């Protein structure tokens, strides 16, 4: 009797499950984060903070180019000692520029990771609210090329809706300049390319 009841209950569960289709959505999380007003403001602030360093690098690059041009134009007419001295200056300035460039790149990547982490914390709560409010069982992030998702129809892409909800939930001071909104994806199915090994 117990076995019959157990078999009947196992048969009923899949039928009930099949009657309630699961709603699945996808999101390009990184694109969504930097497309929100909050994200645009954060990216602009990061660019502004790093602008002096960028200007310094541009000056150093110009100095190296100017020395290289001087060597190329007058190198044949220069005394050997002057040519060697100019070559040493070019090498030293190039090494200094390369070190500064690497430092700037490292700083940018570190600041960018920190920015994305801060946005990600807020974005997660917005995605959760959206999923609950709209009856989604699963929302997958397809912004990573290593995602196991092989195909995605644009009809299940909720990125634009999440950006709009984020902007409603998370307020940004009015002084932030508005950038053009990301275009809403087309409704035709598209394949998500799989990363090659």
Image (tube, helix red, strand yellow):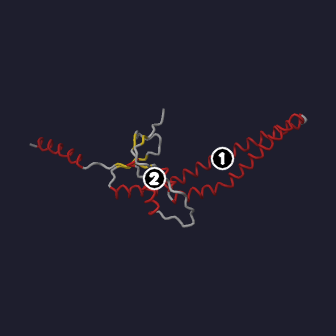
Mark 1 Cα-neighbour bin, 10 Å: few <14, some 14–19, many ≥20:
few
Q: Is residue 158 left or right of residue 33?
A: left
Q: Is residue 159 left or right of residue 87?
A: left
The residue lying at 40 percent from left, 48 percent from top is 187
Disc number lying in front (2 or 1): 2
Q: Is residue 173 left or right of residue 74?
A: left
Mark 2 Cα-neighbour bin, 10 Å: few <14, some 14–19, many ≥20:
few
The residue lying at 14 percent from left, 43 percent from top is 8
Of residue 70 and residue 124, the one placed in the foreground of this image is: 70
- What label sits on residue 60 in the rendered view? none
Where disc 2 sits, the SS reads loop
Q: Based on the displayed image, in which of its 4 quarters is residue 152 positioned?
A: top left
- What label sits on residue 184 in the rendered view? 2
Percent from the top left, x then y, of residue 44?
59, 57
* Marks 2 & 1, CB-CB < 8 Å contact: no
Where disc 1 sits, the SS reads helix
Q: Based on the displayed image, in which of its 4 quarters is residue 15 positioned?
A: top left
Percent from the top left, x then y, of residue 22?
30, 48
Residue tagged 1: 103
Count up the numbered dots: 2
- Give the spatial CA distance, label 2 vs label 1: 37 Å
Quick one: quadrant of the N terminus? Answer: top left
Percent from the top left, x then y, of residue 191?
42, 40
Q: Is residue 85 left or right of residue 156?
A: right
Percent from the top left, x then y, of residue 49?
64, 57
Mark 2 or mark 1: which comes first in sequence?
Answer: 1
Q: Residue furthest left?
A: 1
Q: Residue furthest bottom?
A: 174
Of residue 41 and residue 102, the one placed in the foreground of this image is: 41
């Amino acid at each position: 009797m117990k076995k019959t009841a157990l078999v009947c209950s196992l048969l009923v569960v899949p039928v009930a499950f099949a009657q309630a289709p699961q709603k699945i959505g996808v999101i390009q999380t990184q694109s969504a984060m930097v497309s929100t007003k909050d994200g645009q403001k954060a990216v602009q602030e990061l660019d502004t903070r790093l602008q002096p360093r960028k200007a310094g690098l541009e000056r150093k690059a110009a100095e190296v180019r100017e020395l290289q041009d001087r060597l190329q134009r007058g190198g044949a007419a220069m005394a050997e000692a002057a040519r060697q001295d100019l070559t040493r200056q070019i090498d030293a300035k190039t090494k200094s520029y390369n070190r500064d460039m690497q430092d700037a790149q490292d700083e940018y990547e570190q600041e960018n990771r920190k920015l994305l982490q801060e946005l990600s914390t807020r974005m997660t709560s917005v995605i959760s609210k959206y999923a609950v409010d709209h009856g989604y069982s699963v929302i997958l992030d397809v912004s990573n090329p290593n995602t196991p998702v092989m195909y995605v129809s644009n009809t299940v892409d909720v990125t634009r809706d999440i950006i709009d909800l984020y902007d409603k939930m998370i307020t940004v001071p009015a002084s932030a300049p508005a950038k053009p909104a990301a275009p809403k994806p087309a409704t035709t199915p598209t394949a998500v390319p799989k990363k090659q090994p």
